[in-house]
Every structure is written in C-alpha cells, then in structure tokens.
Image: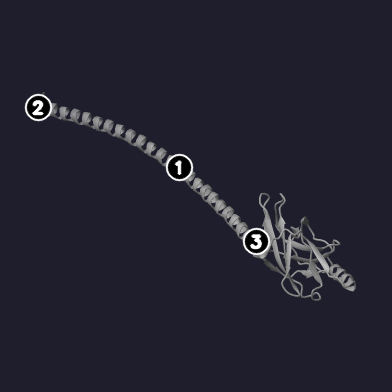
Amino acid sequence: MSTPLQPLITKAGLAAIWRADNTGVAAEITHIEVGTSGYTPANTQTALRTPVAKYAISDGQRLSDTLIHVTAVADDGKAYWAREIGFRLSDGTLLAVWSHPTEALTYKSATAELLLAYDLSLTALPANSVTIISTGAGLNLTLSAELAALAAASLSGMLRAQKQQDALDSQDKVDQVMGQKLINLMDRMRDAETRAESDHDGLLTAVAANAAGLIALQTLFVKQTYGA
C-alpha cells in the first residue's frame, strides 16, 4: 500500500526541471531521503533539516502526467522516526520535501527492513517533466502491498508484546501491594492475639483475688456471728 504525498516543490527543484526541460529531457528522481525533524517545509530548502539516510529508488511507475509512484527499501541497521521526506534528482538537487510539525510518517526499526512506497502528486510541475530512475529491483505495487502488510503485522506484534509486558508489570505491582497488605494484616492479628492472652491472664488473676477476698469476708462474718 502506498502513502499519498503532496510534497512542496523547492525553488532549486523548479530550477533543475527548467534546465532539464530546455534540453528536451525530463528531470530524473533517483533517491528518497529521510530525516527526523518535524516542521512546515519551505520552498527555499536545499536539504532536509536532520537527514539520517538516503535510499536509491528501487522501482517506479508513472500513474498520470502529474502523479508518480516510487518505492525504495530502507535495509540498513538504523532506527528512527521518519518525520521529513526528501526526493533527490540525479544531480543531487532536492526536488521536493514533505514534513509535518507534529505527525511522524513512519518508524524504521534497526532490526527490520522498511518499505518506502509513495504516490507523489506533482501538480505544481509541468506534465511529464519528471521521470524515475530506479535500480531495477522490481518492487511493483503488488509486492509493495505485501511488504507493507508484513511491516504492519510486525509493528502490531511489537505493540501487543509491549501491552502484555505492561500488563505483567502492572499485575506484579498489584501482587506486591497485596502481599504487603497481607503481611501487615497478619502482624495485626498476632498483636491482637497477644493482647487477648494478656487480658485473659489478667482477668483470671482478678477473679481469683476477688474469690479469695469473698471467702475471707465470709469466714470473718461466721466468726463474728457464731463466736467460733
């Protein structure tokens, strides 16, 4: 599946297309460049703000006079959020740039290849003024869709794994809290039992003392009454 983009055509890109058009040929897109800065592009740009990688176009297709499809494979070991995309001509000129102040376009993992597949709307340029030079890897639209599905499935799997780990961490914290509460409850029960035993012993002593006092009082009463 391709991502539709309407990049901003740079002044340098327009000048390069004008030069090529004067010779009767079309400007040639050869590379996709990726960066990590998010912003609103300016047509005065000649480079990305924070470029991290550049990939040769693997395949391309003209969909209409002003709409082209390009694909490339990010197959290095770099990891980054792609927030700016540039399209380079064969002479190195930055033809067009896309970026957004708050939204990332995609994520590149260090351990997986990423398919870069874009449909470019070039309505600001003369019809058929841009062509595509590819490496001939043959990444057609069907294969692009399959790779995109695999990438989406891989990302979905990573998200599920992270959610499961978060759930386990949360449950572990709950178990720790409940365990501590159980320990505190058992300590309070032991304290209560100790106090109960102490109170019971004190009660027995008091009852015994009262009984002894009562017997002594009864004995004295008998002696006084009967003179024994």
> Is residue 76 visible to the viewer in this orientation of the structure?
yes
Residue 14, image quadrant:
bottom right
Tell whether 50 sits left or right of 102: right
Nearer the observer: mark 1 or 2; the answer is 1
The spot of residue 207 in percent (x, y) is 24, 33
Which residue, given by chain and number where applicable, does mark 2 sit on? 226
The spot of residue 196 in percent (x, y) is 33, 36
Residue 23, image quadrant:
bottom right
Residue situated in front as seen by the camera: 145 or 167: 145
Residue at 51 percent across and 46 percent down: it is 173
The answer to whether marks 1 and 2 mark residues whose Cβ atoms lie closer than 8 Å is: no
Counting residues from the start of the chain, the first of labels 2 and 3 encountered is 3
Residue at 31 percent across and 32 percent down: it is 202
Which residue, given by chain and number where applicable, does mark 1 sit on? 179
Q: Quadrant of the N terminus?
A: bottom right
Depicted 9 relative to depicted 225: above or below: below
**Mark 1: secondary structure:** helix
